[in-house]
Image (cartoon, rainbow, N blue to C red):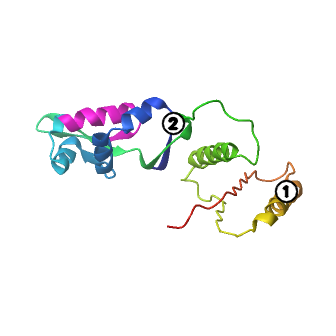
Amino acid sequence: MRDVLYLEQIEQAEVLLKPQRVEVLRQLAEPRTCTEVAARLDQTPQRVYYHVKQLVAAGLVELVKERKVRGITEGIYQAAARSYWLSPRLVGRIGLRRARDELSLGYLLDLMEEVQADVAALDRAAPELPSIGVSGEIRVPAELRPQFLHDLQTALQDLFARYGGSEGDAFKLAVACYPKGNDK
């Protein structure tokens, strides 16, 4: 079972975005038969089997084993991943993409889509994934915002220049700076 499955096909999203199937998928976090899932959800095995077949066809559930029960072959199924990410591209935005203005919120959304796709594509089974995530809050008075953004951009450009050669392992660096919403 993968840690994350990144969904980029509309057909997968359509199969997943049904409350009944989400419940079946949750039950399949552990390998189970349709009969076992049906008992847990208080439904008929036939109804659960229909949803499982749809999930299997979409690549969201896998047949992990089969066994004979009173002469009938019974499948044991498991979810393909522990969690599923829905690509923002499937939802889309109204209107055309804006020009890639690095100070626009549209650019920030595009960047987050790119980061999400890159992270989802990483091989989580790899023995070592050298990565870092840093998050924090800073406060900048309105009159110092232009200087702050300039300083941040200069610091990042310095890192890119210092480590931007063709030797060594490639890493992607994405920094997002945006106004924090009101605390509730």
* Disc 2 residue crowd, few under 14, some 14–19, many 20+, Cα 10 Å: few
Residue at the extreme left:
70
| CA gap, disc 2 and disc 1 | 36 Å
Segment tinted magenta in the rendering? 47-64
* Disc 1 residue crowd, few under 14, some 14–19, many 20+, Cα 10 Å: few
Which label number is shown at residue 163? 1
Q: Nearer the viewer, mark 2 or mark 1?
A: 2
The amino acid on which the numbered mark 2 sits, given as a three-letter code, is Val
Q: Is 15 placed above or below 149 here? A: above
Q: Is 16 placed above or below 153 here? A: above
Q: Quadrant of residue 173?
A: bottom right
Residue assigned mark 2: 91
Q: What x and y, as percent, mark residue 115?
A: 64, 48
Helix, strand or loop at label 2? It is helix
Residue 179 as seen in the image, left or right of residue 80: right
Q: What x and y, as percent, mark residue 145?
A: 79, 62
Helix, strand or loop at label 1? It is helix
Identify the main secondary structure in magenta. Answer: helix
Front one among 93 and 164: 93
The amino acid on which the numbered mark 1 sits, given as a three-letter code, is Tyr
